[in-house]
Amino acid sequence: MANLNIEIVNLNFNFSDQRIFENLNITFKRNRVTAILGPSGCGKTTLLNLISGIILPLSGSIEIPENIKYSHVFQESRLLSWKNVEDNIKFVLKSLNKEDVNFRINHYLSEMELLDFKKYYPFQLSGGMKQRVSIARAFAYPSNTIIMDEPFKGLDPSLKSSLIKLFNKVWREDERTAIFVTHDINEALMMGDDIMVLSKSPNKIIETITNPLPWSERDLNRNEIISIEKKLYKLLI
Amino acid sequence: MIFTMIKINKHIKKILYPVISLSFFYIIWEISAYYIGAEIILPKPITVFNSLIQIILKQDFKIKLLSTLIRGLWGFGISFILGLTVGILAGIFKTFRMLISPIISIVRSTPVISVILLAIIWFKVDNVPIFVAFLMAFPIICGNIIEGITTTNSKLLIMAKLYNVPLYKQVLNIYIPSVFPFIIAGSSMSLGVIWKVIVAAEVLSQPKFGVGTSLNDAKAYLITEEVFAWTIIAILLSIVTENVFSLVSKKVINGKFKY
């Protein structure tokens, strides 16, 4: 059976003359949410760019399944301000028939509680709503892997928490491999099935923790989560 | 009282301020003409106004005005289509941009008078103003479009690329809407320039009909009030076309590109 994981093998990457990654080895398991947790400047976004092929490694390889198709959620919503919500999602949906496009748009907008805002323009939406559109776009796109670069950065804690709940809900109905980078321990604990801690200088994975709780039972006040939280704090300090 | 004056309606201000400035200009003109006392040097405003009415009432006025208008529209149309095409290509493809940039810089820096004189040698008199208008307007439109494309939000382009959106869809949905304000600005600027160079080219190339030709005839016979009158006609032509363009572009923006 073909390997459906994404494997980073002995990857080296330099930025200018500075070595960012040296002999990096990571396995992203299929249909699991992997959170990469690390401080600013540890190369989290660079790692995502390497996985999506925006930049190429100096040496080593990124082994990906043959039929891999990525969708993306960025730090900013990256919506076209001159298109409404529906057309923004339609913009990335090609090679699908009209009915499928409409179904996907309606389905994921409804999952993201945005169906009533289908005809709204980005300037008419709040920051959190725009990011929900961005997540709906990522799900509507027929991908099997979602790459997320600090998608909740800059949002207030209650909004962040409701977005994480929404994401988890949609995710479990439509499982895909997800690679998600963050510097926020709570986000990693609430979303990640696997949490990888990336250190700075040297930039390498120093710990991989499997979340002991299924997403529906994850709560920041649970003892299992608190003990991992403490461990993660120690690793990041 | 003072408070009421400050709160003068915006619409009234829009009319009031130009009226004040034009009245001031009129008074200065009237006083200067009175002191100079020689209408051949500076005619009185009323003399110019009478001359303007006479020109407009003449049978050949329409053909003279239309000839200039058509030349201007041709010049603008060619500049717009070529400027748009070359601008888009140069904006997207860096190598093409590097190849075309020196040519655009040379054209932009060439004195208008050199272009007019060369065009007189190369073309039929009727086509000289069109060629000159094209050479003056093309770099403005093209340059603006290149600027618009190169300043297009790179994050949106990366998003489109990552989602495998084909290039033609990127051009239609990201580049063109981003560049649209630059197209409007470039076209508006070039329309401002075009009438000046068209009239100048007509003065020198002397086509059978045209505002510039009539301007030159008036100068030749020292009918100064007619020189003024034709100048006013050229100014009005420029103002009217710019306003029409501005109205049309506003409608297009409202209809298709909601920002």
Image (cartoon, rainbow, N blue to C red):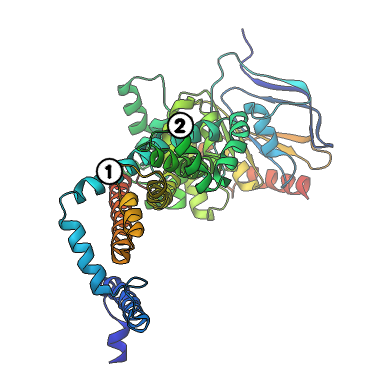
Q: Which chain hosts label 1?
A: B
Give A170 or A136, whichever is nearer the viewer. Answer: A136
Q: How many marks?
A: 2
Q: In the rendered structure, which amino acid carries the disc numbered 1?
A: Ser
Q: Which quadrant of the view contains residue A70?
A: top right
Q: Which quadrant of the view contains residue B137?
A: top left
Q: Which residue is mark 2?
A: B85
Taking the image as drawn, is residue A78 in sight? Answer: no
Give B226 or A125, whichever is nearer the viewer. Answer: B226
- The tag earlier along the polypeptide, 2 or 1, is 1
Left or right, residue B148 beside residue B123: right
Q: Which residue is mark 1?
A: B67
Closer to viewer: mark 2 or mark 1: 1
Residue A97: % across, % down: 34, 19
What's the CA distance linking mark 2 and mark 1?
27 Å
Q: Which chain hosts label 2?
A: B
Give the residue displayed 55% in from the left and 33% down from the top: B90
Q: In the rendered structure, which amino acid carries the disc numbered 2?
A: Thr
Q: Residue furthest front?
A: B221
Give A147 or A186, whichever is nearer the viewer. Answer: A147
Q: Residue furthest bottom?
A: B1
Taking the image as drawn, is residue A15 in sight? Answer: yes
Where disc 1 sits, the SS reads: helix
Residue A214: % across, % down: 55, 34
Give the residue displayed 36% in from the left and 32% down from the top: A105
Q: Residues within 10 Å of mark 1 (few under 14, many from 20)?
A: some
Q: Quarter of the image for the N terminus of chain A: give it.
A: top right
Q: Residues within 10 Å of mark 2 (few under 14, many from 20)?
A: some
Left or right, residue A176 beside residue B198: right
